[in-house]
């Protein structure tokens, strides 16, 4: 009982534990990355110069170097990588929505005792190793793989389709992996759709497709946005799928960071790329979450 | 709706086919006598035998499962605490920074998370001697840090939509807040905790990039082994492993479904 | 639930302690290339010395380098390629000098190879050569003959750099390594230009050569070609000698009718040496020395050569190597080929960075 006096109140603990964990294992490492981004590469261990150059007579000389950021903004290579990532992220998000929306809609409108099993079927693949499934796609898509052998066997094509190591393979891989992230939020929104609104519109003579455009789609927007964000943002920084399925001409930011870090051993440049990317991605995301929660609280 | 039914069903079937074709191909070829995908050499279970003899692959798989279980548990604890703080406490010092820190791992590319944590661990080892070398501990810490962000999102949305009247009633009846949490809140949010645990487990089990950065001697995870196999030439042992994983997951889902179904029936009977 | 949560809090420290306890038993942490040791070498060492070996693998020098540069990698022994990696690492102070008194079998090593390493490692203080090989061209014999005819000499860089020839081979599949140094040097050798010039103009010349055939290249990868050659999915690959020969053996084993061969291009090919090093912060350098000495024994290194199809640097072991491997020109090249082999010069930091940026541009077709 006496111990309780010395323990901080529960409320403070609840805030403090996650806060300190994140501060130590997320914020501090990120500050390291920022520090390195302001340095220069050298041949040593670790391969960058310390910012504190000299401590003499009470004077501390710190050298801060912004040339990495300058290089990123000037060199067209990084702009190409950014555009590459944007393109892949946008196309994949649209494809995911195109495939995921009808699926979520179909499940939401199916008989209630079917819904949970159908959802489980969507999530089940997600629980088997993602790398192994990508490897399965390689076996299907490659020149000498299942798809080409099937198409040639059926006589539909003469020579193998080259899908591996092209942007198409990357899109297939990304959509395959991120589809559940779109279907689930969409399902959650669509299931709350008030069907009486649609009935009322039908009574008033509104055609089904118009009902969809004017009622269903706008009301499901929060789900669409949530799903889109859950695909777009991670795909911007995605490394493994473009690395295994893509060709050398799909240059994305994740791969570029990898190259700068491992091949160039230019940790400062890789770090500045990381810092810029994080700032670019996190601002809209935090804003979106903020407004999302405001809307949820207002509705509740 | 009736007119659109066939279209919707077609789309659903196409979607499921897309999701399951690779998995089916994995299972089918795990029983292929030939090593190649293109040649069907006859039915054989020899790859399962080779899998059992493949020490590195099996120990990597076991290591990954242990790391994932630890990560998921830690992530659920930390994520729930963070969600509670953000939903229930209106204003507190550090709220803004907590919000940002909890969302940022969702946005950070894995390469950055891996790189930054590697630097942190090296610095920590130099200054205070812990963690002593990179290995299972560092991987668990790294995975927990980004997994808790996902758990927070899941639990947060459930907490935000929760009906507070039950809790208020309990408090009115004199129960202390901690008791209210464990007796009332926790059971209500339990589904989202389980969903969060499963999500964190999967994220950890699948992670390649972060683990590559923060792993050390003797701590090769399953994704790392599979990745280098894909580049050097895969053996159908991986198919066998995948089939086993699919089998276990399906079994787990069926059992969970059966348990839930039984509970539903019992609830219905109770209601009468 | 509460008890479960509490229990977990004690698990983390227990984990840390268990890690510490394990390292008190004598352990050796080795970091090597994948598929670069025979199947029973480690077991034999463990039996003879009682030291437990923790053996991890990597598939690129860059990954090893990043771990070494970050510091405190935890490894006692690593196997980088001498040029340019070990060269750079010695300058960066990443290795500890070896205690030669513990390496009684050093005398078995080929003095020519030792001399060739001396200019990057004075007095051979840090490096012990392990295996060496060349980087040339691997090809699917039947398919290439079919496309190019029987008269065309196949030991030439023209197979990958001559636009006319590559265009014909493109549909069948041509790949280059994902290594700027190797590919730029090969391009310059093809053009007959000096291969130790890494200046910007020299690299741009090489880049132009590659850009000319870039549309016909299926992919750039430093290890995927092994599988693809063996399966018949690829016709011509720029690759390491031993890797191509491993593909040859895999195809023969699978009995799929694919015949793979390796050729050292007559215009000149890179010869490289993989070396054993002990990182400066290795936890157990004594055990590392024991393992190095173990690997210097002819009866240990010869089976490794037999298994991985690379030549070792141990003259005493040559007699113990399988005859068909000893006589394989791809593994032990004859004198006249050896004269044309290129020893890489290490580019400067600046040159390396420019090369990498140019390489990224060339690969993405910009």
Image: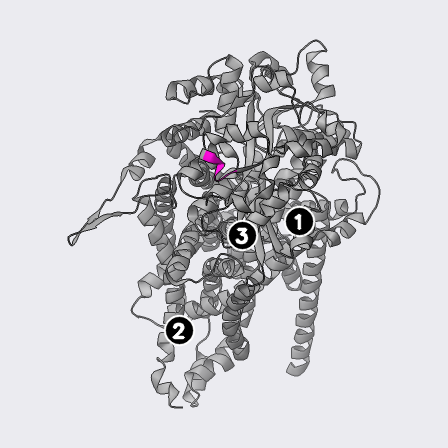
Q: Check the picture and name the quadrant holding the N terminus of chain C.
A: bottom right
Q: Mark 2, residues whose alpha carbon is within 10 Å: few (<14), some, or many (≥20)?
A: some
Magenta part of the protein: which range?
C123-127
Checking the image for residue A14, the label placed there is 2
Q: Which residue is mark 1?
A: C42
Judging depth in this view, the residue of C252 and A22 nearest the camera is C252
Q: Is residue C57 visible?
A: no
Q: Which residue is at a point 41% across and 23% down the rendered structure image? A: C198
Between A275 and A215, the one lying in front of the other is A275
Which quarter of the figure is the C terminus of chain C placed in? Answer: top left
Q: CA distance from mark 2 to mark 3?
A: 49 Å
| Residue labelled with disc 3 | C286
**Quarter occupied by residue A244:** top right
Mark nearer the viewer, 1 or 3: 3
Give left or right: position of C324 versus B72. Answer: right
Parent chain of label 2: A
- Number of labels in the image equals 3
Question: Was residue A233 drawn as part of the magenta stretch in this picture?
Answer: no
Question: Circles 2 and 1: CB distance less than 8 Å?
Answer: no
Q: Which colour scheme appears in the figure?
A: one colour
Residue B60: tell me if it is visible: yes
Instruction: Please state the chain letter of the residue tagged with numbered disc 3 in the rendered image.
Output: C
> Element at badge 2?
helix
């Amino acid at each position: 009982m006496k111990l309780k006096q010395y323990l901080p109140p529960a409320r403070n603990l609840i805030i403090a534990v996650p806060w300190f964990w994140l501060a130590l294992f997320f914020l501090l490492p990120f500050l390291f990355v920022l520090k390195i981004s302001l340095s220069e590469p050298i041949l040593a261990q670790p391969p960058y110069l310390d910012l504190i150059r000299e401590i003499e007579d009470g004077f501390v000389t710190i050298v801060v170097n912004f040339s990495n950021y300058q290089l990123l903004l000037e060199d067209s290579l990084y702009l190409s990588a950014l555009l590459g990532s944007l393109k892949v992220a946008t196309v994949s998000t649209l494809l995911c929505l195109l495939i995921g929306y009808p699926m979520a809609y179909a499940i939401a409108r199916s008989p209630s005792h079917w819904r949970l099993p159908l959802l489980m079927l969507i999530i089940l693949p997600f629980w088997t190793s993602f790398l192994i499934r990508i490897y399965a796609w390689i076996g299907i898509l490659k020149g000498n793989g299942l798809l080409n052998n099937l198409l040639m066997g059926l006589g539909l094509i003469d020579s193998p389709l080259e899908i591996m190591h092209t942007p198409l393979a990357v899109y297939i891989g990304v959509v395959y992996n991120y589809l559940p992230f779109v279907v689930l939020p969409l399902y959650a929104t669509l299931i709350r759709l008030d069907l009486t609104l649609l009935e009322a519109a039908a009574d008033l003579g509104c055609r089904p497709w118009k009902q969809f455009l004017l009622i269903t789609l706008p009301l499901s927007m929060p789900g669409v946005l949530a799903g889109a964000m859950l695909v777009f943002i991670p795909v911007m920084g995605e490394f493994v799928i473009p690395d295994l399925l893509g060709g050398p001409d799909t240059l994305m930011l994740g791969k570029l960071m990898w190259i700068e870090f491992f091949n160039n051993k230019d940790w400062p440049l890789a770090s500045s790329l990381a810092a810029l990317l994080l700032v670019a991605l996190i601002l809209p995301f935090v804003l979106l979450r903020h407004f999302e929660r405001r809307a949820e609280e207002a509705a509740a | 709706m009736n007119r659109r039914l066939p279209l919707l069903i077609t789309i659903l079937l196409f979607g499921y086919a897309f999701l399951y074709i690779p998995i089916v191909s994995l299972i089918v070829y795990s029983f292929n006598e030939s090593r190649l995908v293109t040649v069907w050499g006859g039915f054989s279970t020899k790859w399962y035998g080779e899998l059992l003899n493949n020490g590195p692959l099996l120990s990597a798989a076991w290591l990954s499962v242990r790391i994932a279980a630890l990560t998921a548990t830690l992530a659920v604890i930390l994520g729930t605490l963070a969600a509670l703080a953000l939903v229930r406490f209106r204003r507190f010092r550090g709220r803004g920074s907590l919000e940002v820190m909890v969302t940022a791992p969702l946005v950070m590319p894995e390469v950055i998370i891996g790189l930054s944590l590697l630097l942190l661990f090296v610095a920590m080892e130099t200054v205070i001697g812990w963690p002593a070398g990179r290995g299972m501990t560092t991987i668990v810490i790294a995975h927990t840090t980004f997994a808790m962000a996902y758990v927070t999102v899941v639990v947060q949305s459930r907490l935000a939509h929760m009906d507070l009247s039950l809790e208020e009633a309990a408090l009115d009846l004199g129960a202390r807040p901690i008791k209210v949490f464990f007796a009332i809140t926790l059971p209500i949010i339990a589904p989202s905790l389980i969903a969060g645990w499963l999500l964190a487990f999967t994220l950890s089990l699948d992670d390649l990039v972060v683990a590559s950065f923060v792993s050390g001697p003797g701590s090769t995870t399953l994704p790392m082994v599979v990745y280098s196999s894909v580049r050097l030439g895969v053996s159908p042992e991986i198919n066998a492993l995948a089939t086993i994983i699919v089998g276990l997951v399906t079994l787990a889902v069926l059992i969970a479904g059966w348990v839930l179904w039984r509970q539903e029936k019992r609830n219905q009977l109770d209601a009468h | 639930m509460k008890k479960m949560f509490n229990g977990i809090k004690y698990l983390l420290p227990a984990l840390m302690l268990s890690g510490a306890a394990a390292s008190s038993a004598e352990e050796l942490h080795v970091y090597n290339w994948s598929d670069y040791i025979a199947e029973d070498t480690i077991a034999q060492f463990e039996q003879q010395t009682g030291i437990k070996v923790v053996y991890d693998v990597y598939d690129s020098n860059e990954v090893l380098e990043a771990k070494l540069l970050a510091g405190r990698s935890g490894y006692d022994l690593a196997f980088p390629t001498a040029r340019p990696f070990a060269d750079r690492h010695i300058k960066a102070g990443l290795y500890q000098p070896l205690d030669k008194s513990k390496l009684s079998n050093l005398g078995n090593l080929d003095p020519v190879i030792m001399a060739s390493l001396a200019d990057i490692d004075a007095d051979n203080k840090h490096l012990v050569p392990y295996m060496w090989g060349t980087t040339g061209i691997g090809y699917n014999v039947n398919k290439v003959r079919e496309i190019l005819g029987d008269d065309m000499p196949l030991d030439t860089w023209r197979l990958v750099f001559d636009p006319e020839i590559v265009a014909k081979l493109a549909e069948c599949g041509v790949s280059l390594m994902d290594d700027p140094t190797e590919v730029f040097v090969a391009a310059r050798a093809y053009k007959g230009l000096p291969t130790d010039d890494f200046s910007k103009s020299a690299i741009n010349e090489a880049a132009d050569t590659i850009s000319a055939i870039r549309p016909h290249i299926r992919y750039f990868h430093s290890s995927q070609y092994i599988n693809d050659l063996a399966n018949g999915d690829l016709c011509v690959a720029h690759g390491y000698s031993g890797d191509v020969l491993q593909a040859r053996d895999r195809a023969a084993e699978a009995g799929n009718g694919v015949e793979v061969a390796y050729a050292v291009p007559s215009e000149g090919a890179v010869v490289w040496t993989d070396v054993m090093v002990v990182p400066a912060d290795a936890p157990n350098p004594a055990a590392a020395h024991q393992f190095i000495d173990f690997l210097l024994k002819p009866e240990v290194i010869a089976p490794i050569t037999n298994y991985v199809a690379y030549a070792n640097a141990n003259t005493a072991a040559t007699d113990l190597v399988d005859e068909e491997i000893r006589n394989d020109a791809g593994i032990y090249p004859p004198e006249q080929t050896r004269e044309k082999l290129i020893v890489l010069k290490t580019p400067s930091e600046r040159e390396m960075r420019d090369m990498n940026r140019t390489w990224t541009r060339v690969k993405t077709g910009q």
